[in-house]
Amino acid sequence: MNATKHEVLQSNYLETSYFHDNVDSSEYIIEVKNLEKYFNGFKAVDGINFKIRKGELFSLLGPNGAGKSTTIRMLTTVLKPTSGDARISEYSLKREKNNIKSLIGVCPQENIVFDALTAEDNVEFVGRMHGMSADDVKERSKVLLEKMNIAGRKKPAKTFSGGMKRRLSLAMSLVHQPEILFLDEPTAGLDPQARRIVWDFIHELKTTGMTIILTTHDMAEADALSDHLAIIDHGKVIACGTVDDIKRSSDNGNVIEISFFSREELIKAKQQLEHVDSVKQIICGENNKLTISFAGGAKGFKRDILNRLESFKTLHFREDSLEEIFLKLTGRELREN
Amino acid sequence: MKAIELQTIQVDAKAIQTVDAKTVRKNDAKAFRAVDSKALHIAKKNVKEKLKNFGQMFWTIAFPIMMLIVYKLAFKDDDGSYIINGLTVFSMEFPGIVVYTIGISTMTSAVMFAMSKKDGTLQFIDTMPVSRGNVFLGAVLSETIFMNIQLVIVFVFGYALGAHFELAMLPLGYGIAMIFGVGAIGLGLIIASLLKSPEAANAFGMLTHMIFMFVSGSFFPMDHAGVFFTPHYWVKQVFLQLTVVGDSFSDLLYSCSIITPLSETTIFPIWVGLIIILAFTTAFIALGIKIFQRKTSL
Ligand SMILES: Nc1ncnc2c1ncn2[C@@H]1O[C@H](COP(=O)(O)OP(=O)(O)OP(=O)(O)O)[C@@H](O)[C@H]1O
Ligand SMILES: [Mg+2]
C-alpha cells in the first residue's frame, strides 16, 4: 500500500524532471543511459538515467545502499557496467573509457590515499599521473593543501585523522584541475567548520566552470550546493530536477498552520475548510491549532481560506523541507539490514 | 512472421556487441602498451613507500647479511674435506644465498600488489590516465632498485666473509641475478592475483619461495629431476659455474656443460642455461601480468 503511494509520488517528480526540458543535448556534458550494475545477481544500479549540464553541480541523493557509489564507480571507469552506457564529454564510457580518465578528478567515498607518503607526495603523485610538470604540480599542491588546511605536514598520511585524510583526498582529486569532478560524499566525517570550508571551496570551483557530481545524504549540503539533483533509491532515479522543482512538485508538501483564539472558532473553521477541494488533510492540534495539508498553489489557497475564515490568531505556510520530501520518497525503513 | 522479425533484431544486436567488444579490446590493448615516463613516477612512489616499510627494509638489508653470517657459521669447521676445486663450502653455497636474497622479491612484490588491490590505490590509479603497463613497469623498476641494494650487500659482505668469485665474471653473475629477480616479481604477481589479502600474499609468497628453494636444491643439493623445473636451480648452477668457479668467459659459456645433481655433466652448455633462465623470467612475468589483468582490470 505504502509502495503505491510512493509510486504515485515518484511519478509526479519524474514528470517535472528536466528530462523534458527542451535543452539542446550539446549542453549536457554527461548523459547516463540505462546504466545497470549487477553484483552476483543483485541489482545495485537498475537502469539509471540522468543528464548533467556543463558547469553545473549535480547531486545524487539517496539512502545507504541506494547505488550512488556504484554509479560513481562506473562513471569513473573502475567498475564495468553490466549494461547501458554513458556519454562523458564526447566519449562513450563503454568504448572509450581511457579517454575519459584524463577529463576527470575523483574523490572516492573511502579515503584512498597512499598511507606511507606525505600529503604533498600524495597530491604530487596524482598530478604527475595526469602529466603535469614538476613545477606546476608543486605550486598547485601547495595552494590546495593550504586551502585544505593540511599544508606543511611532513608526517605520512597514515598518521592523519579521518577529517584530514578526507581533505587530502579532496586535494588529490583537484590537483590537475579536471573538467569534471566526482565527489563521493566529500564532507562525510568532517566537522561543521571543515564542512563550511569545503562548501565554500566547492562554490569557488563552480565559478571556474568545473562540472561537479556529488553524492550526499546531507540535505543541507544538497540544498546549499546543487543546481540539479537526482534522488535515487534501489538503484533507480525516483526524482530529478532543481531543489525548487522537487519541492514544488511535492504532492502533499504544502502545509498551512492556523491557530485560533478559542476552540469554538477552530471547530467552525474546520467545518468550513473540510469542503474545500484542495484540502487533503486537517489535523486538530493542541493550543487550538489546525494543520492543513493541501494540494496546488499556495497563493490561491491562501486567498480562498482568508475569504472563508472569520477570525484567527496566526497563520503560516510551511513548505516541506528537502529532508521531509526525501523521507516521503524513500520511505522510513532503515536500509541495508 | 513476428518470430522471424524478432530473430533478426537479436542477430543485429549481437553483431553490434561483438564490434563494440572488439574496439574495446583494441583500445584497451593500446592503452596497456602506452608506457612512458609515468612509470618512473610510479617507481619513485613505490620506493618512497618501501623506504617507510620496516619489513621491506629488513628483507633488503638485514636479511642478506644474516643469511651470510648463518652460512658462514654453519661451515666454520670446514676442515677441507669438503673443498671442491679449491673452493670452500661457503663459496659453493654463495650462489644459493644470492638466489635466496633475490627470490624474496616473490614475497615482497606479492605483498605490494595485494596491498594496492586491498587499499583501493590500484583502482584509484585506474581513474587516472595511466596505463597498466606503466604500473607494472614502475613496480619492476622499484623492485629492481631494492634488488640492486641487496646484491651489493651480498657481494660486499660475502667477499668480506671469504666467499670466492671471479671479479671479472661479476657483472655476468649480477645480470643473471637481476633477470631471475624480474621472474620472481612475476611469480609474486601471480600470487597477488589469486589471493585477496596482503597477509595471505605475504605467507603464500614466502611459502612459494621456500618450496622453490628446497626443490631446486638451493639450500642444500638435491638429487632428483625436479630441480630442472625451477628457475632457482638454473640460476644457482649457472652462477656457480660462471661466476664462482669460472675464470674464462668464452671457454665456459660455449664449451662447458652444466653440471647437474644427477651426473657430472649434461648435454646443455652454459649458454642454454642462460636461455632457460630468460625463458622462466619471460613466462612468469607474462603469466603474472595476464592473470593480474584478468582479475583486476575491466
Ligand atoms: N563490490 C560489491 N559486491 C557486492 N555488492 C556490492 C558491491 N558494491 C556495492 N554493493 C551493493 O550494492 C548496493 C549499492 O551500494 P553503493 O555502495 O552504491 O550504495 P551507496 O548509495 O553509495 O550507499 P552509501 O550511502 O552507504 O555509500 C549495496 O546494496 C551494496 O551492498
Ligand atoms: Mg556510497
Image (tube, rainbow, N blue to C red):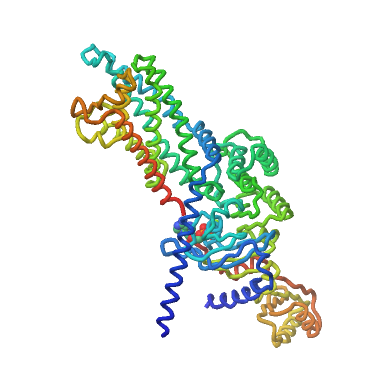
Q: Residue furthest top?
A: B79
Asked if one can make out residue A332 in the rendered structure from this viewpoint, the answer is: no
Residue A211, horizontal then vertical, whole percent:
67, 57
Above or below residue A210? Residue B212 is: above
Residue A317, located in which quarter of the rendered image? bottom right
The residue sitting at 23% across, 36% down in the picture is B226
Above or below residue A261? Residue B213 is: above
Residue A94, horizontal then vertical, whole percent:
52, 60
Q: Is residue B223 left or right of residue B148?
A: left
The residue sitting at 51% across, 63% down in the picture is A335
Above or below residue A5? Residue B112 is: above
Q: Is residue B259 left or right of residue B197?
A: left
Residue A334, horizontal then vertical, whole percent:
52, 63
- Between A47 and A13, the one nearer to me in the picture: A47
Q: Residue furthest bottom?
A: A275
Above or below residue A28? Residue B204 is: above
- Between B10 and A12, the one nearer to me in the picture: B10
The residue sitting at 47% across, 67% down in the picture is B16
Residue A143, located in which quarter of the rendered image? top right
The residue sitting at 24% across, 15% down in the picture is B83
Q: Is residue B271 left or right of residue A292?
A: left
- Between B285 and A223, the one nearer to me in the picture: B285
Residue A26, located in which quarter of the rendered image? bottom right
Residue B133, horizontal then vertical, whole percent:
48, 44
